[in-house]
Image (cartoon, coloured by chain):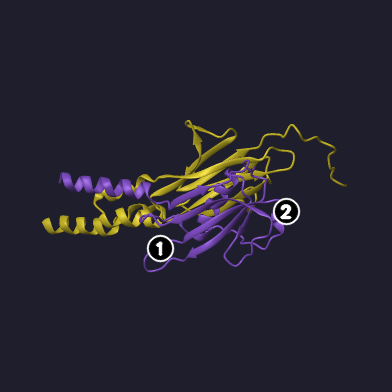
Amino acid sequence: MKIIIKSFLLVSVLFLSSCATIVSGSRQNVEITSEPSAATVFINEIEIGNAPVQKNLKRNQDYQLTLKLDGYKTYETKLERKFNAWYLGNISIGGLIGIIIDPITGAIHKLKPEEINGNLKSGTTYKTKGGNLFIKVSLEIDPNSEKVGQLEKSE
Amino acid sequence: MKNFTRLLFIITVIGITSCSPKITSNFTNRQPELTVDDKIALLDIEHTLPENTVKVGELRFQDSGFSTDCSFNSLMAQARDEARENGANIVKVVDKKKPDLWSSCYRLRIELYKYNGEVSALPQYKLQLD
């Protein structure tokens, strides 16, 4: 019986030795959608494409997220790295190696939209599912823009 | 057991808080802050600085010892934010040390300039996502 317990402990320590890296990975999939759709999405001022768009981002960095669409105010927020609770698995289960490995791979972090005084930027909603981050941005109409016409579908 | 818990706690705190590189800045001639729509040119070592620029300040990125967020692209993105805050529209790398045996980080010395010409037209480094 003692051998089984010892083996179980040893296997746990080996396999859970970098908890967050194993469970979450060093990158996080981020999907950005906009209302109205087709806003141009920039991350760190690099054009990613038109919403809805997906990008696999490294967890160990902060990112500047910008959405632009004609007739709407430019939307800006930050994707911040926050603490990934899976890191605690190293402490509770005793994966000493993981305490060092997870910060190196960046798996100690997870990306979330910036909050100021506990509030998200107006027009932002997000959810995380299966480790992926889904962000939806509702763009505000730019009061300085003026509608000059509407395209119609040709028959 | 108490010592072990303390050690775990210290390592955890270091792990969480010390991933950013050490940034030293020195601004000698701050300019009005730029907006997100103002273009900023990122000039690497091989790119030439145009004439008639005004030096705004200097930045130095070093390895804090626990830095992990220190790729060239990440440092240049941080330098651009600093430049924008301090009114500079040119980020010029003047000294670059690549990751080596002693550090896994890029270490950069950067000068920030204000230029009245069209910065988009300058030959420059194109930032990428890592």
Where in the figure is residue A22, as x and y percent of width and height?
37, 56
Out of B53 and A129, give the one closest to the viewer. B53
Out of B1 and B7, give the one closest to the viewer. B7
Shade of chain B as shown in the rendered figure: purple
Name the subunit of mark 2: B
Where in the figure is residue A123, as x and y percent of width and height?
60, 34
Question: A114 left or right of B12?
Answer: right
Q: Is residue B49 above or below residue A62?
A: below
Shade of chain A as shown in the rendered figure: yellow
Q: Residue at x 51, y 60 (%)?
A: B72
Q: Residues within 10 Å of mark 2 (few under 14, many from 20)?
A: few
The amino acid at mark 2 is: Gly
Q: Residue at x 25, y 50 (%)?
A: A93
Residue A1 visible: no
Q: Which residue is mark 2?
A: B117
Q: Residues within 10 Å of mark 1 (few under 14, many from 20)?
A: some
Residue B52 quadrant: bottom right
Q: Which residue is mark 1?
A: B104
